[in-house]
């Protein structure tokens, strides 16, 4: 199937900003594909010139506008949203970025440096709040926002380390933003996928063991993929979910229910 072919136009006339595509294995790419296949216009971002050759062909594949965004560079987020505003309203925003310095990520929480903790919190959590503030004026007809979390935000997952507290904060931000933005018709969800083989996940110690364990223990008996996550976000962005907000939605084959 051509990736620009609309299979069911429930998002026709909608416009989605998807942040965090690094390559074809990214969760953000699964979201972009799902939105496009359901009729939405998509705007993608790329981190820097090094990432551009990997993201540009994907943007071309789905006829997406492609803009730069490094949330650590002052003014670049504002410039992004100014460009997005030139195209009109925005209906959906996906935040799928996370980072912690390798030494802080692979060491225990007790040994995490202050600088590492703050950097992880800024990029992985507070950037979503900043992004939401800039998106709100463009969501003139209401909309939806999504941030990517993980089960390590709720339960201790060995080797997830500093990202556990950071993702817990991100989930709390989603709930508070859902409360603050509900009267504007803007819905906010944290999405919690099961383990996926992405570039970001490769930085976790013993991640291959986590993947094998998930496939074995999940009630459906297999891992989820990026399109499972994308399709969930697309449903939540549609009119079929217009009264759902503030949830942490697990897309993990039921793994989270297993003790």
Image: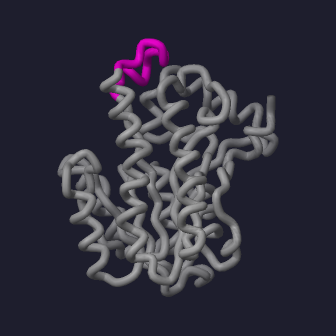
Q: Quadrant of the C terminus?
A: top right
User: Residue 1: in sight, yes or no?
Assistant: no
- Vertical position of residue 154 compared to residue 162: above or below: below
The boundaries of the magenta stretch are 101-113
Q: Position of residue 148 (x, y in %)?
A: 52, 49
Q: Residue at x 61, y 46 (%)?
A: 193
* 223 or 230: nearer the viewer: 230
Q: Quadrant of residue 105?
A: top left
Vertical order, 258 against 176 (above or below): above
Q: Judge left or right: residue 148 versus residue 47.
A: right
Q: Quadrant of the N terminus?
A: bottom right
Q: How many marks?
A: 0
Front residue (pair 91, 194): 91
Q: Residue at x 49, y 21 (%)?
A: 205
- Tell which residue pokes out farthest to the top in this image: 111
Left or right: where does residue 154 sit relative to residue 44?
right
> Chief secondary structure of the magenta span?
helix
**Residue drawn at (45%, 32%), measured in percent from left and top?**
202
Q: Is residue 50 left or right of residue 243?
A: left
For residue 235, which quarter of the picture? Answer: bottom right
Instruction: Give x and y (percent) for residue 191.
Output: 60, 52
């Amino acid at each position: 199937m051509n990736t620009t072919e609309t299979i069911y136009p429930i998002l026709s006339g909608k416009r989605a900003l998807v942040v965090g595509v690094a390559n074809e294995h990214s969760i953000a790419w699964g979201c972009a594909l799902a939105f496009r296949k359901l009729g939405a216009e998509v705007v993608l971002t790329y981190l820097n010139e090094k990432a551009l050759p990997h993201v540009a062909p994907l943007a071309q594949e789905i006829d997406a506008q492609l803009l730069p965004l490094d949330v650590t560079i002052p003014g670049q987020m504002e410039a992004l949203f100014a460009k997005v505003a030139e195209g009109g309203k925005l209906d959906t925003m996906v935040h799928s970025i996370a980072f912690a310095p390798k030494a802080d990520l692979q060491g225990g929480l007790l040994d995490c440096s202050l600088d590492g903790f703050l950097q992880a919190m800024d990029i992985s959590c507070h950037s979503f709040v900043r992004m939401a503030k800039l998106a709100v004026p463009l969501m003139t007809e209401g909309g939806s926002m999504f941030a990517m979390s993980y089960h390590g935000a709720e339960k201790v997952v060995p080797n997830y380390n500093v990202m556990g507290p950071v993702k817990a904060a991100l989930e709390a931000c989603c709930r508070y933003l859902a409360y603050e933005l509900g009267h504007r018709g803007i819905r906010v969800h944290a999405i919690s996928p099961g383990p996926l083989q992405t570039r970001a996940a490769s930085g976790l110690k013993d991640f291959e063991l986590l993947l094998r364990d998930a496939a074995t223990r999940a009630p459906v008996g297999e891992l989820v993929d990026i399109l499972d996550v994308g399709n969930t976000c697309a449903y939540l962005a549609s009119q079929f979910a217009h009264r759902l907000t503030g949830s942490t939605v697990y897309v993990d084959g039921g793994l989270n229910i297993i003790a």
